[in-house]
Amino acid sequence: MTSPSIPSRGRPARLDRAKTVETALELLDEVGLEALTMRRLAERLGVRAGALYRHFTTKQDLLTAMAERMLGDVQASPEAADWAGRLRALARALRRALLAHRDGARVFGGTHSVGPHTLAFAESVVGVLREAGFGDEDAGRTLMTLVNFTLGHTLEEQAAAAPHEDGAPDDPGRLRSAVQAGPYPHLAATVPVLTSADFDAHFEFALDLQVEGLRRLRSGAEWVLPCVDRGAEKRKAGP
Amino acid sequence: MTSPSIPSRGRPARLDRAKTVETALELLDEVGLEALTMRRLAERLGVRAGALYRHFTTKQDLLTAMAERMLGDVQASPEAADWAGRLRALARALRRALLAHRDGARVFGGTHSVGPHTLAFAESVVGVLREAGFGDEDAGRTLMTLVNFTLGHTLEEQAAAAPHEDGAPDDPGRLRSAVQAGPYPHLAATVPVLTSADFDAHFEFALDLQVEGLRRLRSGAEWVLPCVDRGAEKRKAGP
DNA sequence: ACCTGAACACCGTTCAAGT
DNA sequence: ACCTGAACACCGTTCAAGT
């Protein structure tokens, strides 16, 4: 009584890679990375844990597919005028894509996708830089720096947003009391910023630093230095 | 027959926090973070796993103590002349401390120590900046950026150094073949840098970007812009 | 071909009971 | 006070066997 054109009428749904990744991201948003287990994911898909290994060789393989899927949602704003604006837009788009899912930064940071979405993002960044006149080495290293700093930033941001257990004081509280307990005059002055939850501002600050550094690199550091740094730097004494 | 001055003559050694953390770091170097379990650490200490919970409330607590211990090894070079040199030295010292232990970056990144070594490092960075004339907000945000980018960098560096199983191609190989399989002209040109193992150069590049960005921020961006960017940027069209 | 059942070899953590 | 023994409630992964 099994018709060959509808091979599995009895079972509710078959697994495929795309649907599994989608469900895994939903589950991630609900329970977080720590509680995202193969067993729980299988349960949600109406299947036993072992079945997942037909489509993913390992849990790491699933996580990589999730990271790749997340990068599919990066969409930079319409078209900035100059290379600096375009670079900023790409960094912001990556940040948004990582923030879009609970523990998204940790998933992304723990994997190394070479899928089309990930490569397309990298291609965009490197493209902006090369077309702006940067050399291949600088363009490649800038891509690494941009991804590293965006990852590091969103890692911190999502760690700060993570729910802390009942009685335990949150990170800002622990930092504040530790700093005022010891001899840290400089830190004490900056504790308000360090514990600030305005992560947009933190991110934009770091972004500014990169872009301004690139701007100077591009215009050739040597003959620009005397203009900007007139008297600002102590001269190193020769031997 | 138990003398009160030597309470535990029969047992070979008692546990204390410092010795446990030391042994944990040794074990980490040998087996890596994935294989660093409470049971294995207990075995090495001649004790059962449950005993560790007399000194550490949780495994996370132990990892935080390990991160704090690692930061005790940061030692910046003798004394650089200017703030930029001092900042570079501090960033390099942090990188070295994280690289000193297998998976050191992952341990550090997964924890938030507010212990004396960690705070002393933060105090140094913020101190250099404030004494150079940076405001409290900029100093605090620069500390965050410096730590984030150093962490992100060493995370990548140690991931690249991790032993890959038998037949599996390493990350560089997978990236190379993925890039040449698709339409990624810009990426293809930068693949040599992206797969380069010269992490010192990558780190120094990123460090330069931060420092040059800071230099410009310090001298006041507005009236410097026309000097460096004369004609280099397209003007944004007004609405 | 795809999934189940059941197992293997582990985990972190808790806690009565010993010494 | 400090540690053991033993358990609890899980993990990721494998693989014969079913359909």
Image (spheres, coloured by chain):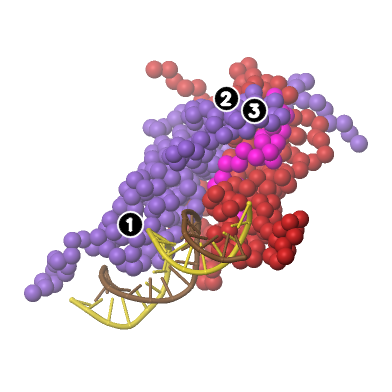
Chain colours: A purple, B red, C brown, D yellow
Identified at 61% across, 41% down, the residue is B113
Q: Residue at x 39, y 43 (%)?
A: A101
Looking at the image, tell me whether mark 2 or mark 1 is earlier in sequence order.
1
The disc, 3 or 2, on the residue closer to the chain's N-terminal end is 3
Q: Identity of the amino acid at label 2?
A: Pro
Q: Secondary structure at mark 2?
A: helix
Q: Which amino acid, mark 3? A: Gln
Numbered label attached to residue A180:
3
Q: Seen in the image, is A87 located left or right of residue B108?
A: left
B197 relative position to A18: left or right:
right
Query: Badge 2, how many Cα within 10 Å: few under 14, some, many 20+?
Result: some
Q: Can you give x and y, in whole percent of width and height, for residue B145 in the image?
A: 59, 35
Q: SS at mark 3?
A: helix
Where does the image place residue B73, in percent across and percent down from the top left?
Answer: 73, 47
- The residues bearing labels 3 and 2 have C-alpha atoms spaced at a distance of 12 Å
Query: Can I make out residue A23 in this image?
Result: yes
Residue designated by label 1: A41
Residue A57 placement (x, y as % from top left): 40, 66
**Which range is magenta?**
B101-130
Label tally: 3
Q: Which mark is residue A192?
A: 2
Q: Main secondary structure of the magenta part?
A: helix
- Mark 1 vs mark 3: in front: 3
Whether labels 3 and 2 share one chain: yes
Question: How far separated are the C-alphas under marks 2 and 1?
Answer: 41 Å
